[in-house]
Image (tube, grey):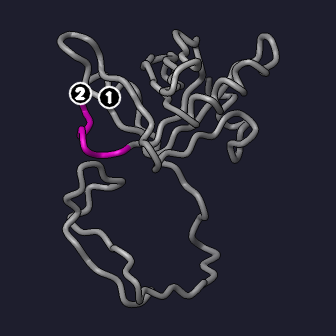
Amino acid sequence: MHNFNVLHNDLQFKACNHAYRMQFNASTTIKDRDFPNILECEYEFKKFGDILAGNFQIDLLVDIVGAVEKMIFSQTQTTLKKVFLNLRDSSGDFLTCTLWESYAIKFLNCYNNQLSGKTMVMILTYARVKEGPGKYPPSLINSWCGSKLLIDDEIPDYEKYQERK
């Protein structure tokens, strides 16, 4: 990569807590290279127990994986579409997750078409951790345009996560 800007990582929400970030500009060029020893996609999942214990940064986006325990509420008939659901991680900890707009629609399509008795597993990348008001626990929410929602068979090595549920 050539001709990019190095800036302080002082964004409202960030993907990593490194002090600096790279920003493309009009003259940035990228040359495709093959690095066989570097994994193409590797997730660093945040444990729900850490979030519940308050071990998170409010401005740092996280990747999560969990089994859908139940859908609590869905709103699809208005201009703002949203879904509230409970997720359970492999340790048995629960968090509430809110999905908005296209993320909510994608979730509902999968949820409504799932096989009876089958546990639904999902990965949400670059999720925001939202502090709970008062004595309520923190919750998860998708980023408006940075998150990626993977459900069941879309997940690479899906069987690995299905076994952890």
Judge the density around disc 1: few (<14), some (14-19), many (≥20) Cα neighbours within 10 Å: many
Q: Position of residue 55 (x, y in %)?
A: 25, 33
Name the residue rendered at 48%, 88% in the picture: 29
Residue 163: percent from the left, percent from the top? 68, 28
Q: Residue furthest right?
A: 115
Q: What is the secondary structure assignment of the residue under circle 1?
A: helix
Above or below 111: residue 37: below
> Mark 1 belongs to which amino acid?
Ile
Per the picture, the main secondary structure of the magenta-coloured stretch is: loop
Residue with the mark numbered 1: 51
Horizontal arrangement in the rendering, residue 150 relative to residue 98 (left or right):
right
Q: How many marks?
A: 2
Say above or below: 109 vs 6: above
Q: Secondary structure at mark 2?
A: loop
Give residue 136's quadrant in the image. top left
- Badge 2 amino acid: Gly
* Nearest to the observer: residue 104 or residue 154: 104
Name the residue located 47 percent from the left edge and 48 percent from the top edge: 145
| Residue hosting label 2 | 54
Alpha carbon distance from label 2 to label 1: 5 Å
Can you give x and y, in whole percent of width and height, for residue 103 in the image? 56, 35
Q: In this image, 12 relative to 84: left or right?
A: left
Tell me what residue is drawn at x 34 percent, y 73 percent: 23
- Say whether residue 57 is magenta: yes
Task: Check the picture and name the quadrant holding the N terminus.
Answer: bottom left
Label 2–label 1 contact, CB within 8 A: yes
| In-front residue for pair 125/72 | 72
Decide: is 20 above or below 14: below
Region in magenta: 54-61
Q: Quadrant of residue 35?
A: bottom right
Numbered label attached to residue 2: none
